[in-house]
Image (cartoon, helix red, strand yellow):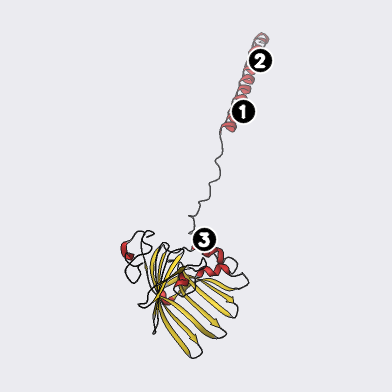
Amino acid sequence: MEQEHKNLKPLLLAATAAVTVIAILLVFFFSGRKSESTQTIILPDPPAQEQAPDEEQPEASVAELTRENVQSVLKKSVARPSSYHQSMQIVITSGDIQRTQTAELWVRGELVKAQITDELETKTILADATTLYVWYDDEAPVQMARGAGMRTDNLAGIPTYESIQDYSKSQIEQAAFVTLSEQAADCIYVSAQDGSVLQDYWVSLSSGLLCKQTMTSGDDLVYLMEQTGLEVFPENDESLEGVFCLPDGTEPFATEA
């Protein structure tokens, strides 16, 4: 019996050692699995918040027009057409006396024909950049030099909006984008104090021309010009053929046309 017990002891020790080895291997196995799992499993990022569709952005507002920037805006944003026919009515008031005129301008490049008519007479001016002819009704034309400061509108006896550039900023009272309802025209409006006279200008943004102008002395409106018609022609259009003539039909500036 004792001998058998001695024989079993080595077997028990061997079995115990084997169990111990298996246990250690199992520990390393599961430890390795856990480590591998820790290394390879990457948690997903939290779901990104669903972005709302872009809200519709309001349209950029028209730049504010001020006394300080109106001269610059006019210079950069308004340009006269190169070829047009403009009709205007002018009312001049002095006390109880009122005089009404019609004025027409035909322009093609540097060529200008202006005609001013009232109840007494018709005055016609034909000019290029340096020379002009003037005549009344059927009288013979008189030729003279055109002064450098005689702008296109001045030939028709009306103010020119380019004169706004001549005012100091302290003279400009108001400036704004406005709609001139009677002409359905979007305009740049400028009010300037010129000595004792308040000058108001409405310059059309679409045509690049002065479409209304007033002069007020004190509380009295002494001058009113309003555009009554406008035709703008494409370059080299034939609509103005034969317009820039003297009474006898000759065209002194034909080569320039």
Q: Position of residue 32 (x, y in %)?
A: 60, 26
Q: Position of residue 11 (x, y in %)?
A: 63, 13
Nearer to us: label 3 or label 1? 3
Asked whether disc 2 touches disc 3, contact meaning CB atoms under 8 Å apart, the reply is no
Q: Earlier in the sequence, mark 2 or mark 3?
A: 2
Q: Earlier in the sequence, mark 3 or mark 1?
A: 1
Which residue is the extreme one toward the bottom?
A: 96
Taking the image as shown, residue 193 lies to the left or right of residue 237, namely right
Tag 3: residue type?
Lys
Residue 76 is marked as 3
Dot 1 lies on which element?
A: helix
Q: Residues within 10 Å of mark 1 (few under 14, many from 20)?
A: few
Residue 200 is marked as none
Nearer to us: label 1 or label 2? 1
Q: Work out whether 221 lies above or below 187.
A: below
Q: Residues within 10 Å of mark 2 (few under 14, many from 20)?
A: few
Q: Quadrant of the C terminus?
A: bottom left
Q: Position of residue 147 (x, y in %)?
A: 50, 67
Q: Earlier in the sequence, mark 1 or mark 2?
A: 2
Identity of the residue drawn at 64% across and 20% down:
20
When asked about the image quadrant of residue 24, the answer is top right
Q: Which residue has dot 1 on it?
A: 31
Q: How many marks?
A: 3
Q: Position of residue 26 (x, y in %)?
A: 60, 24
Tag 1: residue type?
Ser
Identity of the residue drawn at 64% across and 18% down:
16
Tag 2: residue type?
Leu
Q: Which residue has dot 2 on it?
A: 13
